[in-house]
Image (cartoon, rainbow, N blue to C red):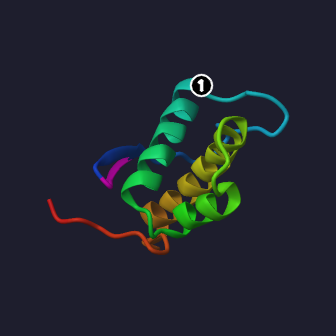
Amino acid sequence: LVKRVFGMEILLLHQKLSIFSKQDQTGNPRLRTAAIELAWLWQRHQPDSAQSRWFRERVGTERGRTRRIAIVAMARKLLVALWRFVTQGVMPEGAVLKSA
């Protein structure tokens, strides 16, 4: 089942989001890369959302490795928020839908 959310097609899976692992880089690398890219775009285009605020508070003015690690955490939080939006209709906090 595929739904269109925020201009992207999201595949609804029956399983938990298993594209990230704290142990190692297991999971689907293409999906992980897309999720991280989505997180960077989300941070840029949805600066008032809870996920973007969390990222700014967590990272501040840090650069390099700290930012890359934090964006992976934000990508996971964002996917969970988008999953809730698609399945339950709960809008991510602070997100703004723009008209086409």
Image quadrant in which you'd find residue 18: top right
Residue at 56% from the left image edge and 66% from the top image edge: 53
Q: At which x and y percent is residue 33?
A: 53, 31
Q: Secondary structure at mark 1?
A: helix
Residue at 61% from the left image edge and 45% from the top image edge: 71
Q: Quick one: which residue is furthest to the front in this view?
A: 61
Above-or-below relation of 78 to 9? below
Q: At which x and y percent is residue 6?
A: 32, 55
Left or right of 28 on screen, residue 41: left
Left or right of 10 on screen, residue 23: right
Q: At which x and y percent is residue 10?
A: 40, 46
- The residue that label 1 is drawn on is 29
Above-or-below relation of 47 to 36? below
Residue at 74% from the left image edge and 27% from the top image edge: 25
Task: Identify the amino acid type marked 1.
Answer: Pro
Q: Quadrant of the C terminus?
A: bottom left
Image quadrant in which you'd find residue 78: bottom right
* Residue 52 seen in the figure: yes
Residue range highlighted in magenta: 2-6
Question: What predominant SS class does the magenta segment belong to?
Answer: strand
